[in-house]
Image (spheres, helix red, strand yellow):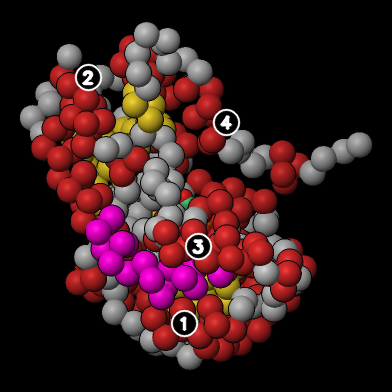
Amino acid sequence: MKLTQQIRRVMPPPVSLANALRAQCPSHIDLLDLSQAVPGYPPCQPVINAGVAALCDPATHKYAPALGFEALRVAHAEAEGVPVDQVAITAGCNQAFAATLQCLAERGRSVLVPTPYYFNHQMTLSMQGFQVIEWPCREDMGLDWEALPNLLQPDTCAIVLVSPNNPTGYVTPADDIARLLRVAEQHDCALVLDETYRDFIDAVQRPTTIASDHLIRLYSFSKAYAIAGERVGSVIAAPALIQQIEKVIDCWAICAPKVGQIMALAGIGHAGDWLSDWRERIQARERLMLNELAGLAGYQVASSGAYFAWLRYPGDRSSTAEAEYWIKERGILALPAAVFGSAEAALRLAFANLDEAGITELGRRLRA
Ligand SMILES: Cc1ncc(COP(=O)(O)O)c(C=O)c1O
């Protein structure tokens, strides 16, 4: 049996690399795991209660509408300040991305992706047969406007932006997002904005609602309400695109998981203060981490925000070799720049996963 070249060319999930690295942690050292971008705490009680009640209701075990429960779509639309026909509920933000690109681009056409990139975006694009045009970030991990005109191709059908960024943590200023949207409009292509981590930055840093048929906003309930396993995300876009996405969801999953949708709805209704509290705690972790890493000879935090920091390290090891060195010698697990398509001597630190004691210990091990 033959497997397609297209799928064989896609890189393996970096989770397998993280697992292989984890296995190399010496048994006498407590692992400091900065590899995974997933909330390390349980959902708040009202969200759990809603999930439990949903499981006990026989109606839950039937399909939901492809675009999501009306109540969740309405609540999400209200929270986003858009009409309900601009909302599709998906099985996580990864499905939101794949379903969007399925509608936007034809095989062989190009998609512009700032690098370092979120690896699942790159993997999805290559398995769907798009040409990925890499747009390397500036030194400070912001968008390199000078390079942009030469990269955009006549067949470029989408520009992808993740803000706050995975893997760099960089928060693209609202003015830059508006500027990129103007570029997309002039080029008649889409700006696909992945805002999975936006709940972990202050409201003033977030882009204001911009109405444009060229803007597609993707969101994840995974991080906000700590329900990554329940698989709920969304697309917010012009109704014409949402109608096409309905076909994709219908074929791929029929609907996003219902228990997750009910939990997301409970989150919108009851988890506001809880989420603000976690935002503040994670921001405090970021400050502590920056403090711990400041002054470490040869190291530089290129950018940080929400869940992540992009740390440049001294020496000439490749990032994969450096990640191996960290786990074997220091018991610290961090993903190498290479899995995000970057040749930089850098590692991604998912610092939000560590509590204060863990971050202090990170500093101690790097200073040792
Ligand atoms: C930028 C980005 N988009 C999407 C996702 C996936 O989110 P979801 O769990 O909603 O599929 C992640 C998860 O790590 C992410 O980092």
The residue carrying pointer 3 sits among few (fewer than 14), some (14 to 19) or many (20 or more) residues within 10 Å by Cα, namely some
Mark 3 residue type: Asn
Residue assigned mark 4? 16
> Marks 3 and 2, how far apart in space?
40 Å
Disc 3 vs disc 1: which is toward the camera? Answer: 3
Disc 2 vs disc 4: which is toward the camera? Answer: 2
Residue assigned mark 2? 365
Secondary structure type for disc 1: helix
Whether the residues at callouts 3 and 2 have beta carbons within 8 Å, the answer is: no
Secondary structure type for disc 2: helix
First-in-chain label (4 vs 3) = 4
Whether the residues at callouts 3 and 1 have beta carbons within 8 Å, the answer is: no
| Left or right: residue 219 compared with residue 274 | right
Mark 4 residue type: Ser
Residue assigned mark 3? 49
Most foreground residue, 181 or 164: 164
Whether the residues at callouts 2 and 4 have beta carbons within 8 Å, the answer is: no
First-in-chain label (3 vs 1) = 3
